[in-house]
Amino acid sequence: NDTTLEIPEEDLQKAMKTNLRVTNQIDDLKSCNFYIVTVPTPINKDKTPDLQPLKSATSSVSKILSKGDVVVYESTVYPGCTEELCVPILVEKTDLKYNKDFFCGYSPERINPGDKEHTIDKIVKITSGSNEEIADLVDTIYKSVVSAGTYRAESIRVAEAAKVIENAQRDINIAFVNELAMLFNVLDIDTTSVLKAAATKWNFLYFKPGLVGGHCIGVDPYYLANKAIEVGFNPEIILAGRKVNDSIGNFIAKTIANKLKKNNKDLNISSVLVLGVTFKENCPDYRNTKVVDVIKGLENESLKVDLYDPWVDVELFEKEYALKISNEKPMKKYDVIVLAVSHNVFKELDLGELYKDENTIVYDIKSFYDKKQVTERL
């Protein structure tokens, strides 16, 4: 694609030290013999895997693939995808024989967007190859740039499965606490207080309730679930977790609407300010953000919603979601303030300046503010 890449200077220096080259021109890569494919693997509207970017990238590599070359995939996929989908494309378009003329590997990308601590060189890298010799080669190459070390998986399928369950496991754990949050809302119990109390036991797994969006946790479980259904297995827990997490935005919107009604507020003239629209804190990435579910839910309740996020590209966000947003702190007063993303900058806000009156609702989805500052927490 005609894509312009903005690459930090420190990453360019690392690339040069390891004899890597950065380019977006396929013809410039003909002299290479080791290719890494790391493209998005989103889902379609019907929740099925959208593998078009992976197919397209594989087709591009096939144009320059030669005997002895190795193609390593990093994109999150279902177990078997590399050898069932990608390898046949390479074979068909080149007439080269798999594991004789060319080879493959899989080493899932594990970086955490916006995380300055857990950078690529500090996270153990899972590696694998299409035979023992290639597995050793792939492992050696990654080991040369990953100071945290590598873990050599038994096969490509094992490495693919390991990656996809990392995100599925987290999705299910968050779904559990999200369901608890909905229950405790009915019981009028503060969820965060319950979790803090439970966390005093050494083996309690602490997960916070919240919106599960982004291009990983909210997407990858569907890759595993679809593969399971394809082979005749019913993935009940995986899909149950997705169902809960996909419903949380609407639950938040309805809870806010009900609170306004209890305060005798007219929903048609009530206003809401949503703080943050990205899928996670302190980063500009809004791919598959579930904050949009909250916004749509509020609008469905006839509420007027304003959006404030200093991190996002306003023009691109508005083009993607057809929603108006501002990078500037609003000067208006609101009936409801929703903390949707825990950007550090929001700690500096004087929420009182945004209150319309003493009945203004502050709904803290992320348990970001002190309990005394908020009316409601998820």
Image (cartoon, grey):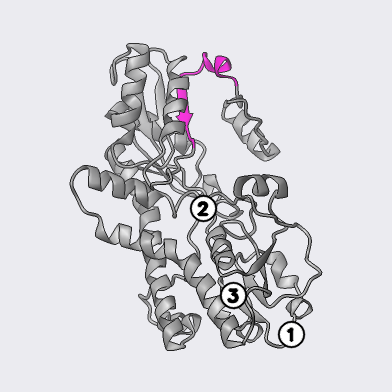
The correct choice, above or below, for 19 with respect to 292 in the image is above
Q: Is residue 227 visible?
A: yes
Q: Where's residue 98, x and y in %?
A: 29, 20
Residue hosting label 2: 214
Task: Categorize mark 2 by other alpha carbons within 10 Å: few (<14), some (14-19), many (20+).
Answer: some
Q: Residue at x 45, y 23 (%)?
A: 34
| In the image, residue 217 above or below residue 198 | above
Looking at the image, which is closer to me, 378 or 29?
378
**Could you tell which of marks 2 and 3 lies nearer the N-terminus?**
2
- Residue at 43% across, 16% down: 65
Amino acid type indicated by mark 3: Asp
Q: Which residues are magenta?
A: 25-39
Q: Foreground residue, 351 or 10?
A: 351
Separation of disc 3 and disc 1 at Cα? Answer: 18 Å
Dot 2: what SS? Answer: loop
Residue 180, given in percent of the width and then of the height, sits at 39, 77
Q: Is residue 307 left or right of residue 28?
A: right
Three-letter code, disc 1: Asp
Q: Horizontal placement of 307 versus 221: left or right? A: right
Q: Nearer the viewer, residue 257 or 70?
A: 257
Which of the image's four quarters has the N terminus?
Answer: top right
Say whether marks 3 and 1 touch (CB < 8 Å).
no
Report which residue position mark 1 lands on.
357
The answer to which of 315 and 175 lies nearer the viewer is 315
Looking at the rendered image, the disc whose residue lies closer to the viewer, 3 or 1, is 1
The residue to which callout 3 is attached is: 364
Q: Position of residue 324 (x, y in %)?
A: 69, 55
